[in-house]
Amino acid sequence: MARLAAWMIEGNWPPDIAKDAGTLEAIDGALAYLAPRMVPVQARQLAVMLARLRAHYHAPKISEAEAAMVASDWARIFADMPADLIGDGMRAHIASPPPACRFAPQPGEIMAHIGDEWRARKKTHAGLIKAREALVAALDTSRQIVGQTQAEQDAARNAGVELIGKLAARLAGRTTEGEKA
């Protein structure tokens, strides 16, 4: 898993993909682990979390309509965030030393506790998806090459060498023309 993380950070894959046949399984395992930690909180679940949070603070009595409005605002703000992370932020605020913990928090205060973790999760998830797609494409290409006959591989290699030669000649011609001017 550490090697997988290093590849993701560096953005390059090892040249011998066949040697790392377990990599696809490792990526799928990491995605499976991360999947439940990416599920957005449900509005009802967030309302329960807010009621629990308010119980920690001396707050004025508010009507059901006002409580629904507050819950709706928080639901919009935290719409894409998972419940475990929001709960972590609420617990962090409650555990904060005064004066931060004296008053019920605003959404931004909860975000301050969990924003870095949420960004890291999203970046890791996106990186795993990108890495999986790149690995699947590389494995598909590798399988196509393995399925080719030697003559087909030689023809493809020769066509590539010829194209590179033409490009090199074109670039050399431009450099020569540029130097003459």
Image: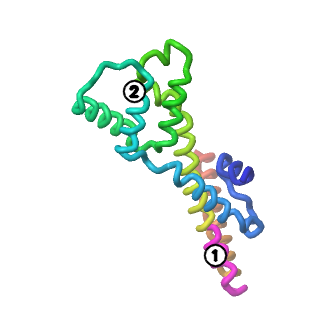
Q: Quadrant of the C terminus?
A: top right
- In reply to whether residue 151 is colored magenta, the answer given is yes
Residue type, mark 1 in image: Ala
Q: Residues within 10 Å of mark 1 (few under 14, many from 20)?
A: few
The residue range painted magenta reads 138-152
Depth order, front residue of 101/8: 101
Report the residue marked by disc 1: 159
Question: Is residue 6 toward the left or the right of residue 105 in the image?
Answer: right
Report the residue marked by disc 2: 54
Q: CA distance from mark 1 to mark 2?
A: 70 Å
Dot 1 lies on which element?
helix
Residue 2 appears at what percent x and percent y? 74, 50
- In reply to whether residue 58 is colored magenta, the answer given is no
Tell me which corner region of the image, top left, top right, bottom left or bottom right, holds residue 27: bottom right
Nearest to N terminus: mark 1 or mark 2: 2
Residue 24 appears at what percent x and percent y? 65, 64
Residue 84 appears at what percent x and percent y? 51, 42
